[in-house]
Image (cartoon, rainbow, N blue to C red):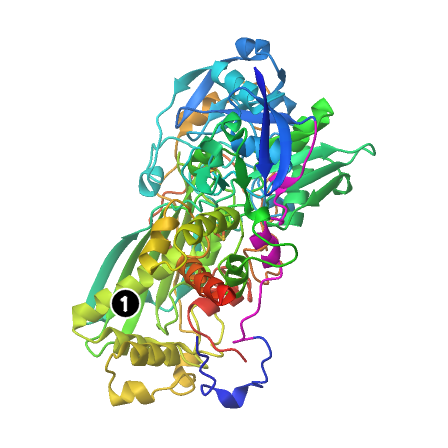
Amino acid sequence: MTKAVRLELNGSPVAAVAEGGENLLALLRERLGDTSPKAGCLQGTCGACTVLLDGEPVLACLTLAELADGRRVTTVRGLQDGPRLHPLQEAFMDGFAAQCGFCTPGMLIAAKALLDREPNPTREQVIEAIAGNVCRCTGYTPIVEAILDAARRLAGRRG
Amino acid sequence: MRIRKELFADERDDALRLVGQPVRRQDIEGHVTGRSTFFDDHPVAGLLHLRCVRSSEHHARIRAIDTSAAERTPGVRRILRYADLPKKAHNILTIFNFGIDDEPALADGKVRYRGEPIVAVLAESRRAADEAVAKVRVDYEPLPAVFDVEEALKPGAPLVNEYIGRNWFRYWGDYDCQQIRFGDVEAALRSADLVVEGRYQMSPIEHAPLETNGCIVVPAEDGRFTVYTCTQGLFFSLDNTAAQLKIESNRLHFIGGTVGGGFGGKVDTVVEPLAVLAAMLTGRPVRYVFSRAEEMQVSSPRGAERIYIRDGVMRDGRIVAREITHYHDAGAYSRLSTYGTIKSAAHHPGPYWIPNVRVDSWCVFTNRTPSSAMRGFGVTGGDFALESHMDAVARAIGMDPMELRIKNAYRDGDMKAHRKLTQGAALIECVQVAAELAGWPLSEDARRDSSRVGGGGERARIPPTPIARTRAPAATGTGARAELPRSGTGFAAGEPRRAMTPPPSRTGGTGSPSTRPEPEPRRGEPIRNEPERREPPPEPPRPASGGHGAIRFSSVFGSRRR
Ligand code: FES
Ligand code: FES
């Protein structure tokens, strides 16, 4: 059983045919060529596959591909505005918030969902927002700091 | 971060351009934009998916493997077996002429740990491969298993690895363990004010990289294979894959360097050889990636190390003797544990000047998951034990633990147990700074002490050293050895090689080959069961060659940059 899925990926309309039971992660990575969401566990425990579905963070490995039909999907490739990096991306770069980089796309998406909802989060809210994202390299502190830093940068941009 | 440039300022040129400055990782822009290309991010059409049937038993003989239902599964293209392996057993250090080829890439008629790969299924989809794997029936004859290093050394323990032929690795031809002998430990223990003993146990630790081990192999028209891989040692893995497949290394093109977390867990080269073999046999591109469950269960963790320490201590805080027995649990196969054991011996007795030292470091085989490299393996476990023990000694004699460390710290000019003169010591200064930052009061003497004074002279001497060689307690598993194997190919035990100092990529320092020719280890030779022989003290056993691993070790225990 296959199903045609049409969705808006990072602002562009795209379409692909999904196998029955195929997950959104496979659809994005293998059929739509966006390999930025990562497969760290394929069982909903690591958060490396996190994407936004209509602005809400979801685990793409546990989301049926066909559920994305007619909806908006945002991956880390959709964060930047043309050549201009998102303040989250800049803050991660300046704050050493990525080492191997494998958790980073999911981490940035979880952080984006938080800042969209709460532009001025507390440290506790940041920790809560990335609680489902495992990072084996950084020890989390630089990530938390970078997200707080990004919130300040965003406020500055809004100015 | 603050760099204490005032320390040893006269010894250095401090015109540092990068140290102390924040520098961006060169790959970080790719990471934050989702454009870094990990091995699994290469689009390859027409992939076959490789999945392994894994042992449910810790130790068993395989009576039969029934793959008929698996072969009938739609989408299955081929099943790889032991018979397909060009080289029947391999160890990743034998390419450096160290160690013994002791591990088959697919089970050789016996499984030695739970999760060991038995056959590999190649199918058009991951799902079909998983379905076929579930349909393979393996008929096991369970064997007694051993999970504890000391149990494994006891007479009559089940023999784990027939290629090794005993449950411990024999070093340099004739040493049952890595041995350091310096001074007369027994006499010093007898004359010490008190003896402080401790037993320390490390747990196996899984690296748990967020990206699991894996690779994608693409056959090229010119007979070569492109291998996208997450290995930490690109050329180390390339050479090992070529050796295991008995092909020229120029037929392999490894592409990698973007590693989704390694920590030592991506050097064992466990996925590439099977995947390249599969591509050779099918002519198709092949993807072999560990599931998260496989990563946790079968990728090699840090080994369980057990360390016994016995110190002879004087009331004034001097440690006059230190005796260490360090067991490394290699699991069922050597991987890099033979080397980790050497590292531990090179690390003991820690950053202290102790006039009488005796170390036995054992590499022991058990039916646990093979262990291997992980972040200072051999050294981290040793430090955990040594520094815990320093605290125990301090408590036993009622001395401040910082003062105890300064009192026993090695100083410039001191002879180490490995017959190297200490240079660039900085432990005392490290302790002083740590005490200051922690607000920990030190005595005036301790605060004024320096690594540059008090060493050398008498302390530069190599003391008279009675060489008592340690032997394994007994021969093991003689019964088990006689019956193997059933597969007909035989345990053509990996050819033992000459012993050399291995410099594994990314884990070692500046190893140089030992020039001493080693006798071939004789398999099946009866193990001498003498307690200890007192031999004339000629050349004491040499642990590792001079500079081996020194860079890594000394950074752990405080030496200064010069
Ligand atoms: S891959 Fe989806 S949560 Fe780990
Ligand atoms: S940077 Fe490696 S897992 Fe987070």
Q: Is residue A36 above or below residue B480?
A: below
Eyeballing the image, is A98 above or below B521? below
> Which residue lies at the image location 41% right of the left edge and 31% below the top edge?
B159
Residue B54 spot, x, y in % from top left: 47, 25
Q: Foreground: A29 or B59?
A: A29
Relative to A131, residue B347 above or below: below
Mark 1 Cα-neighbour bin, 10 Å: few <14, some 14–19, many ≥20: some
Q: Is residue B260 visible?
A: yes
Residue picked out by circle 1: B390
What secondary structure predominates along the stretch shown in magenta?
A: loop
B36 is within the stretch colored magenta: yes
The reply to whether the magenta stretch includes residue B395 is: no
| Circle 1: element type | helix
Tell me which segment is drawn in magenta: B19-45
Whole-percent x, y for residue B128 in the image: 56, 18
The residue drawn where x is 55% and y is 13% is: B70
x then y, percent, for residue B307: 32, 54
Q: In the figure, B3 relative to A82: above or below?
A: below
Q: Is residue B375 left or right of residue A125?
A: right
